[in-house]
Image (tube, coloured by chain):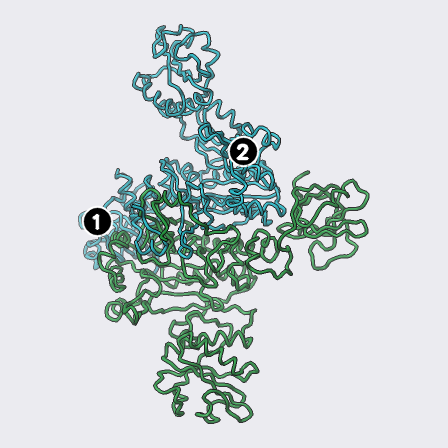
Chain colours: A green, B cyan
């Protein structure tokens, strides 16, 4: 038979009487009074086939079962009962030839939208799960988003350049995968967690604008939306400013909105300083599809004497209209959330029909909150209470239906602190990474804890989808940075020597950003499961259920690497 | 200062008297009679700057050394002594402002084309080596070639889709890198050697046309042109034929030739069967920029009695015009090559001025070869002698200057044997990989050793740049294939169970190809060093000299993986 003439989404009443060749999977077979009807499915859509009785091919058609792969020749005819929901719903194919290209056993999962099968089974048979139009669509969108983003970058004269994945290990790299060397026993490579140093070396080399869709590998502790490997749209440029990079990111996102979502993204994207974001929303990645700002209640409640609030630095919270949801049990749930998120506890006062009720109501009068409203109060340190309110805000918005799913909220968070101070370890940690430039060099030298960074994150509906910074390009400042992070000169030399060296020979001012492709696709396709947008994902337990990986390492292979398993 | 207004390759006499802002690296400083001349270099080119004495910025300009990063403001003026070899050679910039953005120490390698520094030093300072226009150009071309190829595939409605790099280990995978699991001690992932099974699963899932620029990881024994990781243009499609894939590959290469080399590639590309290629050129990747076919001398020499040729199945060789190069020492070198390549030895007869000379000349008369010519004779088995002649052919072509570097020779090799039989192991090995479809199913079942494969390689100037095949899509045939390769049912289940299962549920006919991006760029840019076209390559000893990797694995890290080094 000839190769196919059309995909299965193409034929309409305009093609009436044409002879066509189609191929695909039979997604449904019905034998109605001798007529055999089949839905023929391919990547693009479905076309209905009909095989008449007493034809030579009737017997062969009778053997066809669901998911058989067939090719057919036939004539486009008008359907008797039309289907308005299908592009090909006005026609069907009067089949004149049919070849079975492959048979199929009964599939362990149904190739239909309805089945409510567990994710584990879906992933075990991922190759069947991906036949479902919804599952398939996530990846079709991913492919389109990839091209849209690439086009934006190419249009801005960025070069697509690669970086190695087998890189140098860094002794404290708790999050890094180790690849033992077969040639040099006891030695190994690490899998690159990101192309950070390499993209900066491209700048040192005089490549002005770099990008790459880079795979990144992180052996992180497991969380719902993490994968061992993920794809990053990695960008770096020289002789540019923070504004240039942010503008590029906005152009890229706006084109993507137009190309993929058919929506206009209003530019410029709003900006919030880290401090404002934290103060108002208790988060550096606030979801701004709803308002729900955190109130500072410290002054307002200072005239009341509440034992629970004694010696608390801060009282922060929300005033919300009463809701049937606000039961004692619900407050217990919220209190758990508050405690898990560094608030001391959750107190509340409900004002209804002139009466106050709630955990601390006896300490208040009716002026504390208007009738018909509930006051949520989180005592604690400023940081602790605010952080807890951030978590509370998300929970309340979800439970109270504040989220308008048709909205898209994008916001830049800027002016991040350069460091985080760990009381426990009594040392500074880099909030982004140790290559981020301080906003003010004097601050950096004299008051590092309060130094701001030339760093910027892009947040979409409460998810961080991009993060970047201007980089340190002065060798001495880079060295000081490593010192401030507690490295000795020997450690600096051992771990970053080649990089510090590279900065010595004429490094241009540069900066960049990296966007998470998986997250962008997840948000663009409105799923909340990152695994939906990855063709062959690992589970939350870092396993590939389909391949059954990881699997025991062969003893001989281990020996070949000069290694053995500790019992 | 403003951001830059032009790159350093842009300004010409047309811009005379314009005020411009430039930036870049100072590649040369000359102080001539008080005037300071500088060459300002960026990714794009070089522009000459001039700073006049007695200006406020003269002192600052005097501090500038080679490889300093500067930004300047100035006016375009006409040069006194023009440089015809530079696009900006008619003008220079009369500098009015100059800022030093970064200083530079004296570089350990000169950023110029002339220096003949060792590759080891070049790689240690790769970030400086890449500042050289020639080095940089390899990667600029790589970026362009990538886009050209991607465009060809997108224009043919291929989807760019990703596959995992952390995959299942296969016990005999001698060439695979192992990534030990931190969560499951004694278990591990492998780094994907290619996306082969995943791209076939995409076909099973009903994605019709897939491609990916995939990184592949192979822990191969070291050879001059191998890297631990390389980039493959990976392609697969369903409901297509071998002809379709070959046509796609030709379109892709022809577009690339036009876009990058500005040359027309004549289509269709010539084809040779594996058997003919081997018989005529002693290789499955013949360089056809020169003819130099292997002659069969078995019959021709059968009337002569040469003890050395007794009981030899085959005599193969060449007749070449005499050359001053043809000394005894030279024949000794060639004999080494013959022996290394499975020929028994090399005999020769030189006919010059009516006299015969050479290793076996006394057994011949003057009719054996015309005056002025030398006959090269390799005795051995057909395979051994032919293979040796293939190696000889390459050496002779190089030494005798037969290669016209302005030519490009592309050829498809088709009809490969499906298997290779190892006398040593007494078993069959897959010549390509175990998913390659046999050309004839009866042959496959009854006479596997002589079965041909639906496989095709693309060869460019003697390098294999692409290889592909139609795949087995019938589950039973796939199972038989694994059995023929000596796997037990248990081994098949353990290693390929999920894949065999996948084939059961309606697999379409499919096939594909993979092109080596690194090799294509190497050939397109006319270098013979694969490391030139990789930004940060490993050496032939699998080391990254710049990063100093691999490096000792930290003891704690190893413990965390549940492993220890065997002493």
Task: Count neighbours of disc 2 (C-alpha within 10 A) and say few if under 14, some if 14 to 19, many if 20 or more.
Answer: few
Q: How many marks?
A: 2
Res A442 quadrant in image: bottom left
The percent position of residue A5, horizontal first and vertical second, equals: 67, 43
B452 left or right of B368 in image: right
A125 left or right of B304 in image: right
The percent position of residue B542, horizontal first and vertical second, equals: 34, 42
- Residue drawn where x is 47% and y is 87% of the image: A359
Dot 2 and dot 1 within a common chain: yes
Q: Nearer the viewer, residue B455 or B554?
A: B554
Q: Nearer the viewer, residue A345 or A23?
A: A345
Q: Label 1, secondary structure: give it.
A: loop
Residue B267: image tag: 2
Q: Nearer the viewer, residue B396 or B186?
A: B186
Q: Is residue B87 visible?
A: no
The percent position of residue A140, horizontal first and vertical second, equals: 56, 54
Q: In the rendered view of the protein, which quadrant contains the N terminus of chain A? A: top right
Above or below: residue B313 compared with residue A290:
above
Above or below: residue B143 compared with residue B527:
below
Q: CA distance from mark 2 to mark 1?
A: 51 Å
Residue B106: image tag: 1
First along the sequence among labels 2 and 1 = 1
Of all residues shown, which one is farthest toward the front?
A567
């Amino acid at each position: 038979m000839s190769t196919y003439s059309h995909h299965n989404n193409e034929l309409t009443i305009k093609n009436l009487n044409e002879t066509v060749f189609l191929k695909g999977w039979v997604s449904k077979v019905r034998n109605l009074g001798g007529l055999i009807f089949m839905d023929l499915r391919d990547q693009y859509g479905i076309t209905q086939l009909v095989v008449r009785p007493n034809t030579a091919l009737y017997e062969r058609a009778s053997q066809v079962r669901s998911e058989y792969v067939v090719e057919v020749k036939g004539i486009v005819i008008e359907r008797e009962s039309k289907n308005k929901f299908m592009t090909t719903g006005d026609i069907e194919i009067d089949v004149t030839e049919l070849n079975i290209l492959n048979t199929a056993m009964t599939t362990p999962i149904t190739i239909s939208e309805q089945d409510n099968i567990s994710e584990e089974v879906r992933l075990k048979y991922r190759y069947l799960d991906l036949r479902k139009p919804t599952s398939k669509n996530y990846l079709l969108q991913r492919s389109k988003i990839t091209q849209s983003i690439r086009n934006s970058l190419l249009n801005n004269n960025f070069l697509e350049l690669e970086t190695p994945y087998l890189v140098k290990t860094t002794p404290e790299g708790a999050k890094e995968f180790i690849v033992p060397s077969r040639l040099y026993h006891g030695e190994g490579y690490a899998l690159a967690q990101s192309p950070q140093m390499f993209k900066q070396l491209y700048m040192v080399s005089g490549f002005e604008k770099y990008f790459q869709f880079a795979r990144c590998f992180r052996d992180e502790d497991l969380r719902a939306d993490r994968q061992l490997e993920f794809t990053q749209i990695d960008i770096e440029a020289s002789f540019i400013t923070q504004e240039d990079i942010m503008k590029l990111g906005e152009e890229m996102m706006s084109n993507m909105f137009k190309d993929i979502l058919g929506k206009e993204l209003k530019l410029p994207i709003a900006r919030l300083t880290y401090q404002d974001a934290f103060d108002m929303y208790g988060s550096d990645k606030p979801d701004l599809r709803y308002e729900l700002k955190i109130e500072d209640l410290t002054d307002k409640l200072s005239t009341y004497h509440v034992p629970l609030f004694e010696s608390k630095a801060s009282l922060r919270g929300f005033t919300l209209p009463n809701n049937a949801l606000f039961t004692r049990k619900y407050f217990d749930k919220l209190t758990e959330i508050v405690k898990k998120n560094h608030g001391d506890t959750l107190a509340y006062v409900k004002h209804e029909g002139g009466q106050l009720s709630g955990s601390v109501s006896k300490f208040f009068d009716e002026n504390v909150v208007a009738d018909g409203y509930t006051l949520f109060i989180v005592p604690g340190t400023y940081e602790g209470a605010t952080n807890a309110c951030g978590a509370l805000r998300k929970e309340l918005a979800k439970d109270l239906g504040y989220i308008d799913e048709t909205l898209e909220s994008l916001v830049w968070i800027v002016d991040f602190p350069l460091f985080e101070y760990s009381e426990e370890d009594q040392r500074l940690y880099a909030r982004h990474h140790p290559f981020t430039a301080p906003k003010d060099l004097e601050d950096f030298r004299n008051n590092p804890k309060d130094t701001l960074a030339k760093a910027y994150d892009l947040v979409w509906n409460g998810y961080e989808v991009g993060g970047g910074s201007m980089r340190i390009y002065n060798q001495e400042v880079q060295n000081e940075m490593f010192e401030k992070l507690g490295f000795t000169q020997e450690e600096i030399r051992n771990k970053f020597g080649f990089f510090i060296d590279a900065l010595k020979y004429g490094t241009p001012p540069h900066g960049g950003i990296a966007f998470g492709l998986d997250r962008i696709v997840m948000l663009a396709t409105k799923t909340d499961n990152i695994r939906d947008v990855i063709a062959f994902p690992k589970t939350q337990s870092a396993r590939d259920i389909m391949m059954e990986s990881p699997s025991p390492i062969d003893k001989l292979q281990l020996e070949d690497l000069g290694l053995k398993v500790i019992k």
